Structures are given as structure tokens and as C-alpha cells.
Image (tube, rainbow, N blue to C red):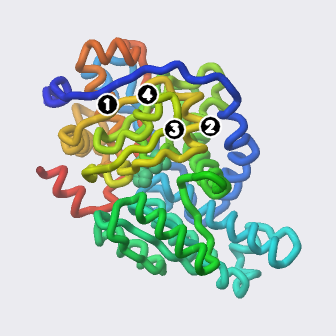
């Protein structure tokens, strides 16, 4: 059953992280603490589970596999529920402060005290699905109009999920990076507010807030695990998830923080190429990966700042491992729990399994019988039709 992982062609490079304070300075301890306090006060907040996959870790010959399952997060299906919604709230809060000339509490915005003013603040983003769902859900909760830009490959089920939260959805004839461009241009022309999960020159505050929101997940994991894992394998699109996680773990666990292994589709290896070049590097996405959330050619600048200081390994995986990894969670080994993981959630798992089955990779990644590996289960079946077709393939 693991043969496909043994035979797969993965690329790996190990780098020495640059020294510096990026894990303290880009998203500060205060940023995380504010986000955690705010999000935990929202209606519907509950901790997501951390599963222990004992039979899988025995089979792989490592000390432990832990899976932080973000599928149930606020009923939205992914960890992104924590980011866009929170960053949208902060945009509203900053804009109201500017317009009304006084500090406005998030609590008052949530209560609807400034409903008429909030109704004039349009929030905008490009998305491949999950970030836009989070933003449209948040915008609806806080009373702001929302416009979402999707690229040509985003599934209609994902588009509809955003419309269901009241967003106006525009499909762009191009890839993810083209949808980011169009969202940005339309926002400039119309006085709308971009709430992006990726940063670029001169645009950093909302992506910082997005990463701070992910601190809810890392804080929960910290409390659920108690002893730090030795490794965390994290899938990347623009790198915001991995950066938010690794900076937070460094703040929480200090020198005991896990070794950060970045995992990308071989069709969109922008962080792998950045690590190879020693600087942030864009790649052309010629073919879309099935892992829709990871199909990004341009790393987030602030995420790269953190990752260049925190990540020591960069791995790319082929498309052939996606369905087998999803199936392994849906039909688990022995007594392991059944887990519903969407196609963008399993890259870390796929790289881990291949890493344990290929002896040179196993050594290169420092995987031993003592390794305790954390995986971030970043989504559930956010498109049930795609999920079913892959798991049953
Ligand atoms: C399910 C899922 N996992 C991982 C990622 C990657 O996150 P990031 O783009 O912040 O690297 C995404 C991004 O959309 C996603 O939807």
C-alpha cells in the first residue's frame, strides 16, 4: 500500500535558516495574543481535534504522528476560517477609526453598533476557495459587503459557498496570480479594501493579521501536545500558513520548536525555488495542481521573511501521491481514526510517508524511531464532489 510512496520522485533541499528575529518581529507576540483573544470570543468557537495516528507511526517506523484536524473549524472546513475573517474585522476597525476619529472596539463592531458605517466598507480578495470563504463569512457576520475574485480553475461548489455567505464572486480568466492582480486593480478603482492572505511590496498589514489568526490553531496545538514535536510538515501555497505556524511555535516552544519541513506541489514550487536561490523567487504555474489551495507561483514576502529564518527543509511532491494520501486517512490503518482530508490538506502527510519509505530522504529529513511528527490537516472535504472522486478513484 505504501509502494507508491516508496517509488515517488520527490525533490528535497536542506538549507541553513538565516539568523535573525523574524519569528518575533513580523507577527509579534501581541499580534498573536490579540487574535487569539478575539477569535476565541466569537460565537461557535471550539477547539479542533489533534489526532494521534499510532498505527501509522508504527508502520512508518517513527515515534509518533499527530494530525491537527482543521476540518471542523467554525463549520467552514479549513484553518483559513481563522485568517481572512479576522483580518477583515481589523480592516473594518482601522477604517472606522480613521473615519470616526476614535478607537472602535471589535466587540462594538460585532454587536452592530456601527452597522451603517460598516455597510459602506467593501472587503475584497482573490482566493482559490478557503480564504475567500473565510472573508465572506466574516464580512457577513460583521455586516460589510464582500467581493471575491476566483481564477478559472476554482470549482463552482467553492464559488457557491462564498455566494451563500453573501459575497459577489467574479471569475477571472487566468490563474491565481491573475485573480490577485484583478482584485487589487478593482479595489483601487472603487475604494474597496483588499484583505489578502499574501503580501507584496507596500501591502503587509492584513496578511500579518491573517497569520496572527492562525495563532489560534498553534496555541491549541501547543496546549494539546505539551511536549513539542520534533518535526512539523506543512503544505504551502504563498507560505502564510507555514510562516504563521512556525513563528508561533518558535515563540511558544523556543529552542525546542520543531524542525519545519515545507511541502509544495511540484507544479507550484515557489518556496522551494526561493530556498534554492536564497531569496524570494516567483515561479510560473504552467499546469494547475489538484491541490487547489497550494497552486501559487508567488511567495508572500512577509511569509518568506519568517520561513527563511525558520524552515530547514523544502520538499516537492508529485500529483500521484494526492489520492493515496487522502485514502490513507479515509480508510486508516488499524485503530487509527478515520479522517476526512481535502486534496490541499495532505501534502505534508504525503511527504512524510515518502520520507520514511525512501532511505536517503529519511536520513536527510532526520526521521528516526524517536521522531514525533506534527501534520497540519488544513482542510476537510471543502469540495465534496472532488473529495469523493479522489478518495474513490
Ligand atoms: C487547505 C489549504 N492548505 C494549505 C494552504 C496553504 O496556505 P498558504 O497559502 O498560506 O501557504 C491553503 C491555501 O489556500 C489551503 O486552502
- Choose the circle earlier in sequence order: 1 or 3: 3
Q: Earlier in the sequence, mark 1 or mark 2?
A: 2
Give me the disc on residue 248. 2
Residue 371 makes an appearance in the image: yes
Query: Mark 4 sits on what residue?
Result: 276
Mark 4–mark 2 distance (CA, rounded to whole Å): 24 Å
Of badges 3 and 2, the one in the foreground is 3
Give the residue at mark 3: 280
State which tag comes first along the sequence, 3 or 2: 2
Query: Which numbered disc flags the more N-terminal residue, 4 or 2?
Result: 2
Q: Toward the viewer: 241 or 39?
A: 241
- Can residue 220 be seen? no
Report x, y in % for residue 143.
Answer: 62, 80
Q: Examine the image and state in which quarter residue 178 appears.
A: bottom left
Residue at x 43% of width, y 20% of height: 14
Q: Is residue 255 above or below residue 260?
A: above
- Residue 40, image x, y percentages: 64, 56
Q: Label 1 belongs to which residue? A: 351
Q: Residues within 10 Å of mark 4 (few under 14, many from 20)?
A: some
Q: CA distance from mark 3 to mark 2?
A: 21 Å
- In the image, 195 versus 69, the foreground residue is 195
Amino acid at each position: 500500500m505504501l509502494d507508491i510512496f516508496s517509488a515517488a520522485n520527490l525533490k528535497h533541499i536542506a538549507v541553513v535558516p538565516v539568523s535573525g528575529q523574524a519569528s518575533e518581529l513580523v507577527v509579534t507576540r501581541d499580534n498573536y495574543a490579540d487574535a487569539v483573544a478575539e477569535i476565541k470570543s466569537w460565537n461557535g468557537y471550539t477547539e479542533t481535534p489533534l489526532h494521534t495516528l499510532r498505527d501509522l507511526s508504527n508502520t512508518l517506523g517513527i515515534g509518533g504522528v499527530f494530525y491537527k484536524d482543521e476540518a471542523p473549524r467554525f463549520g467552514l472546513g479549513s484553518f483559513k476560517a481563522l485568517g481572512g475573517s479576522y483580518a477583515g474585522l481589523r480592516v473594518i476597525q482601522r477604517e472606522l477609526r480613521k473615519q470616526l476619529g476614535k478607537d472602535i472596539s471589535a466587540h462594538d463592531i460585532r454587536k452592530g453598533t456601527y452597522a451603517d458605517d460598516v455597510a459602506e466598507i467593501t472587503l475584497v480578495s482573490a482566493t482559490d476557495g478557503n480564504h475567500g470563504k473565510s472573508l465572506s463569512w466574516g464580512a457577513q457576520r460583521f455586516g460589510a459587503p464582500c467581493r471575491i475574485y476566483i481564477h478559472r480553475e476554482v470549482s463552482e461548489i467553492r464559488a457557491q459557498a462564498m455566494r451563500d455567505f453573501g459575497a459577489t464572486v467574479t471569475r477571472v480568466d487566468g490563474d491565481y496570480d491573475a485573480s490577485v492582480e484583478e482584485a487589487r486593480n478593482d479595489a483601487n478603482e472603487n475604494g474597496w479594501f483588499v484583505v489578502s492572505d499574501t503580501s507584496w511590496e507596500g501591502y503587509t498589514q492584513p496578511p500579518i493579521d491573517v497569520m496572527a489568526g492562525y495563532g489560534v490553531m498553534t496555541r491549541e496545538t501547543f496546549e494539546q501536545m505539551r511536549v513539542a514535536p520534533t518535526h512539523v510538515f506543512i503544505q504551502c501555497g504563498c507560505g502564510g500558513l507555514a510562516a504563521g505556524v512556525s513563528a508561533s511555535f518558535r515563540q511558544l516552544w523556543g529552542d525546542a520548536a520543531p524542525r519545519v519541513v515545507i511541502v509544495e506541489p511540484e507544479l507550484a514550487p515557489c518556496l522551494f525555488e526561493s530556498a534554492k536561490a536564497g531569496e524570494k523567487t516567483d515561479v510560473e504555474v504552467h499546469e494547475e495542481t489538484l491541490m487547489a489551495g497550494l497552486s501559487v507561483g508567488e511567495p508572500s514576502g512577509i511569509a518568506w521573511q519568517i520561513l527563511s529564518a525558520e524552515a530547514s527543509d523544502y520538499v516537492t511532491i508529485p500529483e500521484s501521491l494526492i489520492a493515496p494520501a487522502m485514502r490513507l486517512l479515509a480508510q486508516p490503518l488499524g485503530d487509527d481514526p478515520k479522517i476526512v482530508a481535502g486534496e490541499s490538506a495532505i501534502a505534508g502527510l504525503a511527504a512524510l510517508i515518502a520520507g520514511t519509505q525512501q532511505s536517503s530522504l529519511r536520513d536527510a529529513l532526520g526521521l528516526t524511531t524517536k521522531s514525533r511528527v506534527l501534520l497540519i490537516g488544513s482542510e476537510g472535504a471543502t469540495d465534496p464532489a472532488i473529495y469523493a472522486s479522489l478518495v474513490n478513484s
